[in-house]
Image (cartoon, rainbow, N blue to C red):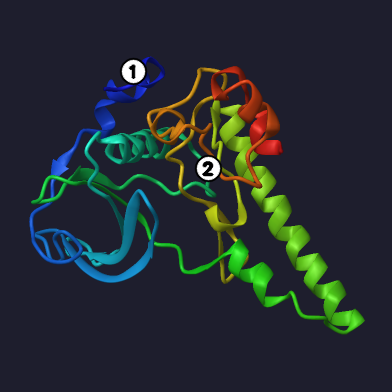
Amino acid sequence: PLASTLIWAANDHSVAPRRLDGGGEADDADSENYEIGELLGEGGSAMVFAAVDRRDGRPVAIKVARADERGAWREALRNEAALLARIRSPGVPALLDLGTTAAGRLFLAMPRVEGATLNALIETVRPAHPRVAAALIRRRFLSIFLNLCETVDAAHRQGFSHRDLKPRNVMVSGYDDVHVIDWGLGGPTGAGYCAGTRRSDAGNSGGTPGYIAPEAVRAGPERTDHRVDVW
């Protein structure tokens, strides 16, 4: 069942689910509206596929929730969809579609970002560089960091927190535009945790070890605010 803090999401008619038909390994590879391509990434809760919207030829990304007995990943994806529908920022992917696959799995569609994660960019510059090159690299990463701060600040000003900010959840395009992804653990700032929390599922406070704010671990996310993203 939805947590009480997610009533706002359940009542959002702008993200009412629609049916996606099809079949295949991607749980429905080709559909009436989407031609599913390669697997872009996957985690414990969902898989993300490259796709093309057959209606207008637009490249999109399709995120499909994995099946689980208690439906926690489905609710996390529904929560993410509700946030993407509400947050207005160039750095937050827009919700294009929400529905269920032929196998009954929830999916959402969003614009496809061509680029790399911030984590991947950091890994490419770990080796030593000449001083001039290092200065240019620092300048580039400072620019990326400022763009990231502007995106997160925009979400905070609209009353929402991400709660799982880390380099793997930041996409950087070829023009160094920043896109914050994976909002499944997010929610209204100061309104408690969301359906995507893994606190009750795995006995922890959600988030990622090494990045989660100490107060979220000690006091629980329901007692935190937007400062967990600043951490």
Query: What residue do we see at 14% from left, 58% from top?
Result: 33
- Foreground: 202 or 21? 202
Residue visible at 55% across and 42% down? 164
Residue indicated by mark 1 = 7
Q: Is residue 125 above or below residue 146?
A: below
Specify the amino acid type for callout 1: Ile
Q: Residue furthest right?
A: 131
**Quarter of the figure that contains the C terminus:** top right
Which image quadrant is residue 214 in?
Answer: top right
Q: Give x and y (percent) for residue 127.
A: 77, 80
Q: Position of residue 47 (x, y in %)?
A: 32, 57
- Residue to which mark 2 is pinned: 89
Front tag of 1 and 2: 1
Apparent side of residue 214 relative to residue 96 in the rendered image (left or right):
right
What's the residue at 48%, 50% (across, down)? 181
Instruction: Identify the secondary structure beneath mark 1.
Output: helix
- 18 vs 181, left or right, is left
Question: Relative to 77, is 124 on the left or the right?
Answer: right
Mark 1 and mark 2 residues within 8 Å of each other at the beta carbon? no
What separation in Å lies between label 1 and label 2 (alpha carbons)?
Answer: 23 Å
Marked residue nearer the N-terminal end (1 or 2) = 1
Q: Residue at x 29, y 64 (%)?
A: 58
Outermost residue on the front side: it is 203
User: Callout 2: helix, strand or loop?
Assistant: loop
Q: Position of residue 121 (x, y in %)?
A: 64, 70
Q: Is residue 198 above or below residue 188?
A: below
User: Which amino acid, by three-letter code, is at mark 2?
Assistant: Ser
Q: Is the N terminus in the top left, top right, bottom left or bottom right quadrant?
A: top left
Residue furthest toward the top? 4
Above or below, 210 against 190 in this view is below
Badge 1 density bin: few <14, some 14–19, many ≥20, Cα 10 Å: few
